[in-house]
Image (cartoon, coloured by chain):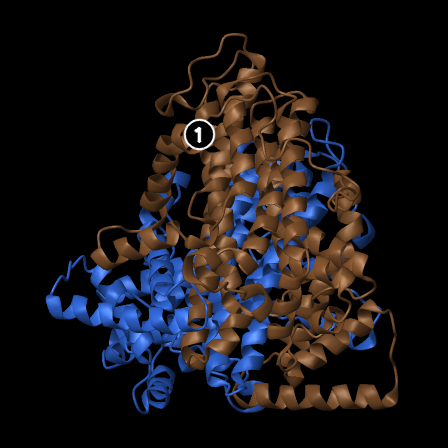
Chain colours: A blue, B brown
Amino acid sequence: MNSTAKRILASSNRANGRVLCRSRLNNVHRCNLLQQQRSLASSVGLSVPEGFKDTVKKTILDHALREDSRLWQSTGDDPLDDLDLEFETTRYWPSLPPGVETIDPIAISSKEIVKLVESIRDDMLNTEHPVLQKAATYFFQSAADGGKKVRPMLVLLLSRALSDHIATAHQPVTSSSLLPPALEWQRPELPDLNRRLAEVTEIFHTASLLHDDVLDDADQRRNLPALHTQFGAKIAVLAGDFLLAKACVTLAKMGDLRTVQAMSTVLEHLVLGEVMQIRGPKADGQKSRLRVYLKKNFYKTASLMALSCKSVGFLGEYPDELIDVAYRFGKHAGMAFQLVDDALDYEGTAQHLGKPSMADLRSGLATAPVLFAAQEHTELIPMIDRKFKGNGDVERAIEIVFRSDGIERTKELAILHAERAMDALLELNPSPSRDALIQLAYRVVARTR
Amino acid sequence: MKSSAKRILAVSNRVNGRLLCRSRFNNVHRCGLLQQHRFLASSVGVSVPEGFKDTVKNTILDHALREDSRLWQSTGDDPLDDLDLEFETTRYWPSLPPGVEAIDPIAISSKEIVKLVESIRDDMLNTEHPVLQKAATYFFQSAADGGKKVRPMLVLLLSRALSDHITTTHQPVTSSSLLPTALEWQRPELPDLNRRLAEVTEIFHTASLLHDDVLDDADQRRNLPALHTQFGAKIAVLAGDFLLAKACVTLAKMGDLRTVEAMSTVLEHLVLGEVMQIRGPKADGQKSRLRVYLKKNFYKTASLMALSCKSVAFLGEYPDELIDVAYRFGKHAGMAFQLVDDALDYEGTAQHLGKPSMADLRSGLATAPVLFAAQEHTELIPMIDRKFKGSGDVERAIEIVFRSDGIERTKELAILHAERAMDALLELNPSPSRDALIQLAYRVVARTR
């Protein structure tokens, strides 16, 4: 870790530990550093000392983390309550719940999804230039999440499932007629509202990926020329900001305040999740590490799904019980999704390329497999705390994880969350779209990369 | 210009010129480059080719620029209409308009502003740690805009001016009672809504500064170690995202959809302005360069003021004519503000330090002084187009600008905009807060740094 990073972490650690370190030596040392930086900055005609600004920014992030408990009090949710699902056992796996039809979620949503991707492309990206066309295709079918557009799919299918829960006679669900016309009390433009919500959801996700590009440790270790990476950083930030802005305008125009509030909260959660990931686990006990990791997963992944699903409930002006069903479904589906991702990082590509990517480990990230493994193999704990930066840590950790039941337990927790998602849906009256969603939750945990 | 930057600009130029360049050579060349990137990327375990992603991001930005006319059609504004104010002459300067009292805007808003800064600090920044306290103080009294918190001041004073326009008897305006109590038809919590709007405005401004930090041309020339800058980039992005997210949640909670839409549009404009600044002027005629520059100023600076002022009127549920007054005031005040900034960059610190900062010129930015000068001294034009990167360009440009009337004409345009801002306000019934705002517009153009 370079000295600047050390210094910033040190001062933030002091703030966190609430040690008001006023020792002369420390203050003098820091003053000198800042003086040096200030003179560096002013010698090239800049007015703001870099050191100050970094410290301030870091403070903002520290505060973001501390804010955490207040955050959850205000929404009335505590994602910690049930994320580790201790003492639960699977009930349906490896079967579907009884009475659920096997409907292919991709088949019935594919037409709408294609329309959505085109709509985003036509509104957001130019497709006349052949190379750009290729690039746009690549980016919007990112391998990162199987390119399956899970998030918009959830929104679109759920809008149908909620409607069919209410309506006694179901229109046949075909891919040409997925979105239901508005029910009597609903706004007539509801189908379009749902489409736009699905777009906004995917755009939020994409924008966060763009910003994560800047934040990825991988950039630093890539040994690309600094300038190229820096130029890419600015473009990444601007493009992400632009997408976010367009999405926010779209949201506002949809005219539903609860949806605006929910989706704005998503933005906050995405940042919190990223901050938690950068700062690393709060190291006070293995159980605590697992809980923090699960909470981080909620913020980074599940929240967007949970709150966009909830927004489907808002837009359709459904009663509170249904809004809660929507939220619980999205939340647990999202948790399952990320857990499987984390398991596949250790295991997934083994069938295909002969070696797993281990991207998480290599970037110092401790996810469920290694956290579960550490509950029995405590020698992992110091490695986790130093983010696997020690000599040979990565290799040793891999070896221990594969010897342990870490990956197994990760998949099991994923299944438990998927079943919880299914349980939420099973509160809805049977319909093809409801069963398609249940199938989707099933496939999330049944998939290999 | 670095080759990666060249490549990206080349691609975007082709897109802009609508040249569907399919030559074998170009495609092969580009494929070659992309292949190299993909190989590099995959060799360190990252799955997305850097070249593709940069191209896509740049496409997003290109599209952002093209979007421009559509954008303005949807809101019914065209900022190009009246930004260069050709053929106008000043009417009041150097006096205030007749019948306007000399009220000090800072004096009557100072208490609220202090409350605002503290509120942002307490909510956003930790102030227990001594060094962080100093840093927070510095950052929120940034020298960049005189640290005068102009933006929140506009919001708070305007809320009072609009209210006093309606009421026949005015409560005395003291600094302890600036914000008016809600009128009969208004929401009772209106004073708090205005405070929060002022906070959101300042936070948006700060967040955009943080994101702009990610890569200023100045950063490139600072020669700081690449790792430090990248770490700084991460922090800048995250902190900016955090602030933006908090502001968005706050906005949503204020419960006014028109305000959410307006402020989201600000975000879009901030990005557009930054993109226009990065891409440089579209070089087709000197008049066009000036117009593009003025439009960029609108997006980067005036839009936030225009739309936050408009939002004051939204929140107070004022009739459309007053909403328009608010918007026009903010827009022209913002244009004046930025033009004076640009003039002072050439001139301002001369009185204080003996040498102007010329930061704009040095970063390749052509602003009003040099653009006006180029209308007579056409030898400036190639220098402008190559962003003053040629040997001796900066010095020559400085010399020519000071020989010309460029700075004078810049100040004159600023005054014209300030007078337009005053004209908007003069449509309001007289009141101390209205006059304080007129005084504020006056001071914007009367100031030296």
Question: Residue sitting at 35 percent across and 39 percent down?
Answer: B119
Q: A99 or A204: nearer the eye?
A: A204
Coordinates of residue B62 in the picture (x, y in percent): 74, 64
Query: Residue at the left extreme?
Result: A23
* Residue closest to the eye, A197 or B368: B368
Rendered position, B311 above or below A294:
above
Q: Chain of mark 1?
A: B
Can residue A322 be seen from the camera position used here?
no
Q: Quadrant of residue A72?
A: top left
In the image: residue A269, left or right of residue A184: left
Location of residue A348 with respect to B144 vertically, above or below:
below
User: Which residue type carries mark 1?
Assistant: Asp
Where in the figure is residue B152, as x and y percent of width and height? 47, 38
Q: Which residue is mark 1?
A: B104
Instruction: Give whichever of A172, A273 is nearer the camera.
Output: A273
Instruction: Classify mark 1: helix, strand or loop.
Output: loop
**Res B78 → quadrant:** top right
Q: Nearer the viewer, residue A99 or A219?
A: A219
Horizontal placement of A282 versus B183: left or right? left
Relative placement, left or right, of A380 versus A193 is left
**Which residue is rendered at x = 60% and y = 28% of the image?**
B314
Point out the image quarter for the N terminus of chain B: bottom right
For the residue carrying disc 1, how many other residues have a C-alpha within 10 Å: few (<14), some (14-19), or many (20+)?
some
Residue B391: in sight, yes or no? yes
